[in-house]
Each structure stands twice: as structure tokens, then as C-alpha cells.
Amino acid sequence: MNFKYKIFAYIFNFFKLFSFNRNDVFFILDKKNSFNGNSKFIKNELSKRDKFKFYTLSKEDYSFQGVKSPINTIKKFFTLLNFFFIGSYRLSKSKYVFLNDNFFPLAYMNFNKDVTIFQLWHAPGAFKKFGISSLDDENVKILTKLSNKNLKLSVSSKNIFEFYQEAFGVNKDQIFNFGVPRIDYYFNKKYNNNENIKNIRKNLERRYPEIKGKKLVLYAPTFRENKEKNDDIVNKFDFKRFNSCLGDKFSLIFKSHPKITTPSIEGVIDLTTYSDEKELLLISDILITDYSSLMVEYALLSKPIIFYPFDLDYYLKYERGFYFDYKDVPGPIAKDTDEIIKIIKNNDFDFNLIDNFVKNNYDYLDSNSSKRIVDYVLKSEF
């Protein structure tokens, strides 16, 4: 498994010998479409400071998933050439490197001392376990630690330092609580204002006129490693009953995790491919989820969250587990669709739970997380 990581690193180390006058910015993404989160906000902040050249590389490019036909094989060949040679060359010329996921070639790459490598990750707070905290494979644990030996990372609160230290296998002095860039969105009046929220909703109503005059309930479950358990996400939610009991006042929006392929669901608006989930959080009146880290963001909006962990025992035993006792989530826990309906009808929500959760997971409630990170990276303030 380590072979492709070493190849990329060796090519990078060769190009680095000939790289001079470096001032470029390089983003290493988990997926091609994931630039809409932390990376986007960092790029926007950097663009205010200087005329940088920006480059991106997606980990998807060295995956062979979906390569079935001869044409796809040829396309993949050229994609791999671009990844290993053009990508590593541009990376060798970059002074600032940002990631939103682990990138194992870093374990074998030799960066100059003046290069800053900053892990942005892709979720705030601490909820379900990730990284080394959730790994059994010793080889991957070692790779993760080696990959992260020189990077810096920012968290949303000093209260979760130890979780991120464990998950990334880093020293505490590599972690800063500058905040999470994508959180700037919710405190930026350019985005979070009544006019913008109305426009987002109007655009959605043009596509789905049936939501007009109704409150929006967003069901956003996360994925399981087991395919059969992923199928249960749809099977364990009674969409017809939800609509028959609440459909006169509420419209149900379904947003599945990108890793899951779900069948068409009658009576539900499937927005799994919606380009920016932050917009959906803004316009939704209630969030229903199981173990998705989206709830850590949604809590910032002080709106109701219902937790529906229909397979909690399985998830605790065979999947990731959590950094805190699940019963302490900031909202009511439902065991079936009827309980979800009852909670909504009775408006059974304790907003003190949400407020306390936010205080524990965020040190900054402002739109300056990106600024703090860029200030540090450019050494203009810290």
C-alpha cells in the first residue's frame, strides 16, 4: 500500500532540488469537490494579502475506483501522470501547503524548513472519533503519524486539543485554537443575513414548489463502513409516516453522505448532490442526524437538532465510537420515526443543551478563523 505514496514522495524530492523563488500556495484535497469548505475560505483570505499562485491536487486522482472500461483506463493513465509529475512539481515549488485530510505521501517527503504545512481538516469540534482514534491498522497509524510530523493544525476550541492530538498523532505544540475557516460563513453577514437566506430558499422553491409555506426538516445521516448498515439508513426511517403526520407544515429534505448511494425515496426531496451544505443548514428549521459532524456546525445556529441513532449499539461496537458519551448530545434522542414526530409536534427541545455544547466546542464565535490562520501562516501577527 505504501508503494504509491513513496513514488509520489521520491518524485517530489527530486523536483525539490530544482525549485527556487517559491511563493506558491498548494491545496491537497480529499475530493475534487471539497474546495467549498475550509480551503475556499483560506484561499479567499490569502487573496486579500498578496498575489499568490494557487494549485490544487485531489487524492481521488490516485484512486482506481470506477475504472472499468478501456477509455476510463486511458483517462486514468493521464490523470496519474498529472498527479505524480505535474502535481509533485507544483507542490515542490510551494511555500504554503494546506490539506483537508490525511495525505500519506507526506510521510516520505522532505520539505524545506521555511515551508508551512497546515492541516485544515474538514469538520469542527469533536464528536465521532476519527484518524488514529478510530484505526485498527497499525501500518496506517504509523503512516498517519509520519505524515503529520511537520504540520500545524487548528481546532475550534482548546477543550478538544487532546482529541485532535490523538487523532493526528501530533505533539500539542503543533495544535492551535485559531478556529475552523468554514465557520466564518455563519458569522459573516455577507452569507448569514435574511436576504441571502430568502434567496437560497427561493431558488430551492423554484425547483421544489411543494416546500412553499412549510418549515424545512433536514435529515442528514452519515455513512457506515458496512454497506448493509448504509442501506438501513433509508429502511429504518418511515418517510411516508413522517409526511402523513407532519407533511402539512413540514417538508423533509434528505442529504445523504457522499460515500453512500441511496435509492430514490418517494415524498422526499433528495439534495445529496447539493453543492453547499452550509446553505442547507442556514435554511433548515430542524436537523435530524445520527452521527454526522454537521450537527457541530448546526449547533452554532441555535436551532433544534434531533438525534436518530437507530444502530447505536452496532456503531459503538463496530464503527468509530465517540469522544464523549452519546447520551450527552445537544438534543433529544429518538428510537424511531414516531418519536421523531412526537418531538417535533411537542417542540420538545432544550436550547440550553445546544448553548453549552457550543461553548465547549468553540472558543471563537466570529468570522475571523481564516484570518487568524493566515496571520499565523504568513507570520504577520503571531
Image: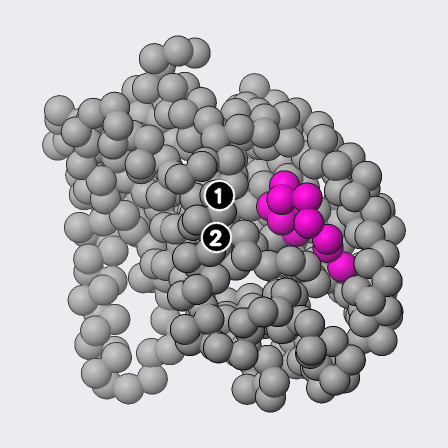
Q: Is the C-beta separation of discs 1 and 2 under 8 Å?
A: yes
Say which residue label 1 marks.
192
Label 1, label 2: how many angstroms apart (C-alpha)? Answer: 7 Å
Left or right: residue 128 versus residue 70 is: right
Where is 355 relative to 7, above or below? above
Q: Residue furthest top?
A: 381
User: What element does badge 2 sit on?
Assistant: helix
Q: Which residue is mark 2?
A: 197
- Name the one closer to the observer, 81 or 60: 60
Q: In the rendered structure, which amino acid carries the disc numbered 2?
A: Ile
Confirm whether residue 282 shows in the render.
yes
- Viewport quadrant of the N terminus: bottom left
Q: Is residue 6 visible?
A: no
Q: Nearer the viewer, residue 260 or 371?
A: 371
Magenta-highlighted residues? 295-306
Q: In the structure shown, which secondary structural element does the residue marked by tag 1 occupy?
A: loop
Which residue is rendered at x = 27% and y = 48% of the image?
A: 56
Image vertical order of residue 270 relative to residue 223, above or below: below
**Number of the label disc, if any, that sits on residue 87:** none
Residue 248 at x, y percent in the picture:
69, 78
